[in-house]
Image (cartoon, helix red, strand yellow):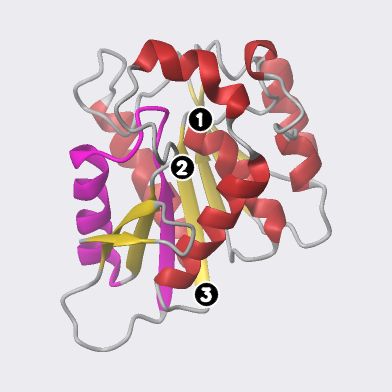
Amino acid sequence: MRISLPSGTPAELALPSDAAAPERGLVVFPDIGGLRPLFDEHCARLAAETGWAVCAPEPWPGDEHRPLDWRLDHVGDLDDERVLADVVAAADATGASTVGMLGFCMGGMYTLKAAGTGRFHRAVAFYGMIRVPEQWASPTQGQPLDYLAQPAACPTMAVVGTADPWTPAADVDALEAAGVEVVRYADADHGFVHDDSRPAHRPDDAADAWRRAIAFLSA
């Protein structure tokens, strides 16, 4: 179901069928395409499979109608303070004190940043940018590695493909050196897990990555 966070940002909230209050929550941060039926389905599936309350906030409130080309040119306009406040509000919306987070692509980059907020139990970034790409650099975009260095940063896993130009090998090595558990999939390109309509989708690797992510978040 759609809800509004305190900021007015829309979010999808999926609750498990069990009437008892969920003991755990999960925030799902969408890719650059934003909140759409694909992520409604992920939220519903994850709530059903895990028994957790799952909430996915819209990354682009007020700009949901914008095309992909526009979004690619305007990630630098996103403000970490606003986005991370919405992410924390989404965690609160689950009603659980123990909340994990996962995100994809741009949402994976924000998952790495959110890991440093102190709100999350564990975090999993799927092919999130480890350093802010040059074309997105701006005063409102902090570096994921800096957030991960915060004292309150939670245990974090990164799922990456070795053929992904958005996560260069040197950046992945730096992420691992920062204490992140990295799972590499040989020859996988960007976006190989979460959207089976993409040419890059790899069903077997996707199933394995989902299994590893849920196991990590369940610890």
Residue at x 73% of width, y 57% of height? 153
Element at label 1: helix
Q: Residue furthest bottom?
A: 20
Whichever of callouts 2 and 3 sits on the residue coming sooner in the sequence is 3
Residue 44 highlighted magenta (yes or no): yes
Compare residues 49 and 26 and report the one nearer the observer.
26
Residue at x 69% of width, y 12% of height? 134
Q: Which residue is mark 3?
A: 98
Residue 219 in view: no
- Left or right of 36, for residue 90: right
Residue 104, by quadrant, is top left
**Cβ–Cβ under 8 Å for marks 1 and 2:** yes
Mark 1 belongs to which amino acid? Met
Compare residues 198 and 142 and report the one nearer the observer.
142
**Magenta-drawn segment:** 24-51
Compare residues 67 and 213 and report the one nearer the observer.
67
